Image (tube, helix red, strand yellow):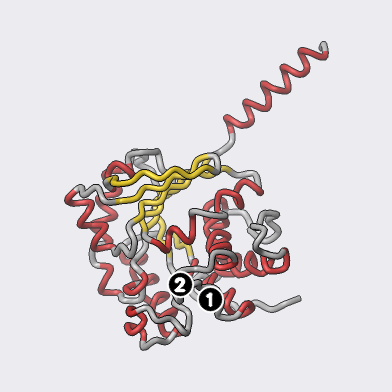
Amino acid sequence: MSYTLSIVFLIIVSISDLQAKKVIKVLAIGNSFSVDAVEQNLYELAKAQGDSLVIGNAYIGGCSLDRHWNDAKTGKAEYSYRKIVGGLKTVYENRSLESIIKDDNWDVITFQQSSPLSGKYKSYKKLSSLIKYVSKTAINKHVEFAFHMTWAYAKNSTHPGFINYNKDQTEMYLSIVNAVERVIRKNKIKRIIPSGTAIQNARTIFGDVLCRDGYHLSLSIGRYVAACTWCEFLTGKNIIGNLYWPPTISAYNAHYAQVSAYEAIETPYEVTRICEF
């Protein structure tokens, strides 16, 4: 085979490999906590281990399940739709939930509750209706549903919703675990993304410094822990040893963030105390 033909053959093989590569498409129906979890680091983490993601986020700040359901029923175009393709994020304002769901052939669609209500089981009543709507609307009739279990506030949080848990981080975390475990069983959701447990794990080694304002995750290590959790959930690959971390995080801290996420995937409803080697 000539040199030129060899080059052409290698190019064709490379293109075929790219085309055959599995692209996982995930849509979060969320709020600012899904912004923290999926809009940074997640694509890069997957890419570093040879995977490709298309990431969508149907965002309304502080949005509860009740509001998502109401917007689904009425078709209100009040979502900010953030979509990451090839690592580049595009934001589309004033979109309806229906248009976002139908925008792509999503493999996974996730749900989550607003943070003040996340540990209140009775606040999840409309989840079943929302699931039915999304199932009916989705292009991919084999789409997988998952629930994003979010995190408890920092101990010194001044968020007004913290009073729901007597301003106690442990009480809030345990309430979230209890509510989510019951909710996914009732609604037959088979899988959970345990960001809340990953953050609680990470607090055992980093301290209570993972929130930037008492409830949203810090822009560096907090968001990275959540992204690591989502990455392992979506790809099924052990996140420990992943070679991507942003320049604001040291290799040391990246390792323990990855360990925190891995342990959460292994035991999503229990805190694992992370110890230094």
Q: Are marks 2 and 1 in contact (CB under 8 Å)?
A: yes
Q: Earlier in the sequence, mark 2 or mark 1?
A: 2
**The label number, if any, that marks residue 200 in the structure image:** 1
Q: Is residue 98 above or below residue 231?
A: above
Q: Residue furthest top?
A: 2
Q: Is residue 238 above or below residue 141?
A: below
Q: Is residue 93 above or below residue 64?
A: above
Q: Is residue 175 above or below residue 99?
A: below
Identify the residue shown where x is 29% and y is 54%.
131
Q: Which of 261 and 165 lies nearest the eye of the viewer?
A: 165
Q: List x then y, in percent, for residue 219.
A: 54, 64
Q: Secondary structure at mark 1?
A: helix
Q: List x then y, in percent, for residue 263.
A: 60, 69
Q: Which of 132 and 275 lies nearest the eye of the viewer?
A: 275
Q: Secondary structure at mark 2?
A: loop
- Dot 2 amino acid type: Trp
Identify the residue shown where x is 59% and y is 77%.
272
- Dot 1 amino acid type: Gln
Q: List x then y, in percent, for residue 209.
A: 56, 77
- How far separated are the C-alphas under marks 2 and 1? 7 Å
Q: Which of 132 and 68 lies nearest the eye of the viewer?
A: 68
User: Which quadrant: the N terminus?
Assistant: top right
Identify the residue shown where x is 36% and y is 81%.
162
Identify the residue shown where x is 53% and y is 68%.
218
- Which residue is denoted by mark 2 in the rendering? 151
